[in-house]
Amino acid sequence: MPPLPKQKQSRTRRDKRRTHDSLKTSNLVQCSNCGEMRLPHRVCPECGHYKGREVFEVEE
């Protein structure tokens, strides 16, 4: 049998371990072409532009 803990861990120790488990908010930036919010360093899904040039055409 594997070793078992001798005592119950306190809520404080348990919560200290879980401090990094929370979800982080995604930081969005405004598209320079259409003004929609998008992820940084990604092509805008609304207009298809990235860094001032059209990367792909968006079908309506």
Image: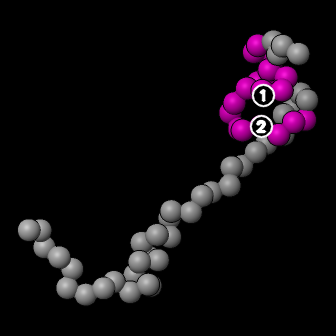
Tell me the residue that label 2 is attached to: 38
The mark that comes first in sequence, 2 or 1, is 2
Residue 22 sits inside the magenta stretch: no
> What is the secondary structure assignment of the residue under circle 1?
loop
- Dot 2 surroundings within 10 Å: few (below 14), some, or many (20 or more)? some
Q: Residue furthest front?
A: 1
Magenta highlight range:
35-56
**In the rendered view of the protein, which quadrant contains the C terminus?**
top right
Residue 52 visible in the picture:
no
Q: Which residue appears at 73% of the width and 26% of the height? A: 43
Residue 20 visible in the picture:
yes
Position of residue 48 relative to residue 26, above or below, is above
Q: Residue furthest right?
A: 34
Q: Which residue appears at 25% of the width and 87% of the height? A: 7
> What is the secondary structure assignment of the residue under circle 2?
strand
Q: Which mark is residue 44?
A: 1
Position of residue 42 relative to residue 56, above or below, is below
The answer to whether residue 14 is left or right of residue 33 is: left
Whether the residues at callouts 2 and 1 have beta carbons within 8 Å, the answer is: yes
Quadrant hosting residue 4 = bottom left
The front one of 59 and 39 is: 59
The front one of 43 and 59 is: 59
x, y percent for residue 20: 50, 64
Position of residue 39 relative to residue 3, above or below, is above
The front one of 12 and 4 is: 4
Q: Amino acid at mark 1?
A: Cys
Q: Amino acid at mark 2?
A: Arg
The answer to whether residue 36 is left or right of residue 5 is: right
The answer to whether residue 41 is left or right of residue 14 is: right
x, y percent for residue 30: 84, 40
x, y percent for residue 49: 80, 22
